[in-house]
Amino acid sequence: MDIKVLANPQEIGAAAGKIFCDFIRNKPDAVFGLATGMTPVPTYEYMANEYAKGNVSFKKLTSFNLDEYCELPREHKNSFYSFMVDNLFSKIDLDHKNINFLDGNAADPAAESERYANAIKAAGGIDIQLLGIGRNGHIGFNEPADEFSDEAFKVKLTDSTIQANSVYFDDVPMPRYAMTMGIGSIVRARKIIMIATGESKAEAVKKMVEGEINAQNPASVLRNHPDVTVFLDREAASLLSKSPESV
Ligand code: F6R
C-alpha cells in the first residue's frame, strides 16, 4: 500500500484524476471501476476538465460502478447513477452503452450479482478501481461483517452509513438497502486508487492501515493487494502512528 498525503481535496482530485487520465491515454479501451460520494467529486472534475481541454478521450472506456441504492428509481436525483451522470458521464465522451451499474431494483439480487460478474468478466476485468472509504471502514457498501463477500450482493446499510448519507436525501427517506460489488470483485481489480479526505475518515484510515485484516474492518483487505495507492489529506492521515511522507 503506497500512501501519499497531499494538501487538500483539490490536490487529491488532480493526482487521482491524472492517474485515470494517463491510464486511458495508454489504454484507450480501459475498464474503470468507479465510486460515488463526495470524495471523488474533485477527481471527476479533473477528468472532465482534461476532456474539455482536449487532453484525453473516454470514447472507448467501459465503466463499472461499485454500488447502487435499492428501492430508488435509477432516475432519482440521489441515485448513484444520477450522481455519475451529473458529475462525470454527461461531461465526457464516454459511450453510454459502456456504462455498467448494478440494478438496485432487481427482483432477484443473486441473478443480478451473476449478471454483473459476467459483465465484468466479459469486459476483461477491471483495470483500475477508484475507492472511497466509509467512516466505518466500508469500501463499496461492504459494511463491517462476519466474513468477506465475493461477488455483488444486497446489503443492509448500517446506522453509520445511513447517518452519513441521509443528509443528501430531502424528498424521500434514504434507502436502507443497496446492491454493492463484493470485496472479492473489488480486489480483483488490477490496480486500486483509494482516496480519503477529512477528519471524519481518520479513524477508518488508521484501522485500514494499522488494524487487523478482517471483515469487521473491510478496507484492511486492501493491504493484501499488490497495487494500491492511497491519497489522503492531512486530516484523514492525522491518526496514523507513523506519518507517511507528504508529497
Ligand atoms: C460509493 C461508495 C462508498 C463511498 C464512501 C465514502 O460508491 O462505494 O464506499 O466511497 O461511503 O463516501 P464519501 O466520499 O461521500 O465520504
Image: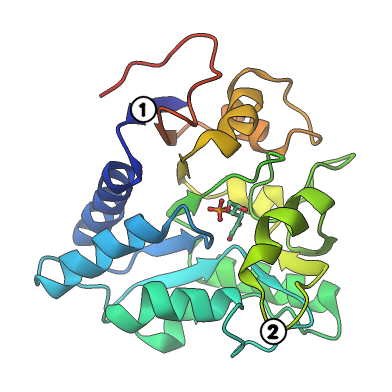
Crowd tier of the residue under label 2, counting other residues whose Cα lies within 10 Å: few below 14, some 14–19, many 20 or above: few
Query: What amino acid type is highlighted by mark number 1?
Result: Lys
Say which quarter of the image contains residue 49.
Answer: bottom left
In the rendered view, does 73 fall on the left or right side of 85? right
In the rendered view, does 37 fall on the left or right side of 214? left
Say which quarter of the image contains residue 58.
Answer: bottom left
Query: What amino acid type is highlighted by mark number 2?
Result: Asp
In the rendered view, does 2 fall on the left or right side of 81? left
CB within 8 Å, label 1 to label 2:
no
Q: Position of residue 144 (x, y in %)?
A: 80, 42
Q: Which mark is residue 47?
A: none
The secondary structure type at the circle numbered 1 is: strand
| Residue 94 seen by the camera | no
Q: Which mark is residue 4?
A: 1
Q: Which one is earlier in the sequence, the residue at label 1 or at label 2?
A: 1
170 vs 116, nearest the viewer: 170
Give the residue displayed 71% in from the left and 73% down from the top.
Answer: 69
For the C terminus, the quadrant is top left
Residue farthest left in this picture: 54
The secondary structure type at the circle numbered 2 is: loop
Q: Is residue 55 above or below residue 219?
A: below
Q: Position of residue 228 (x, y in %)?
A: 46, 35
Q: CA distance from mark 1 to mark 2?
A: 39 Å
Residue picked out by circle 2: 171
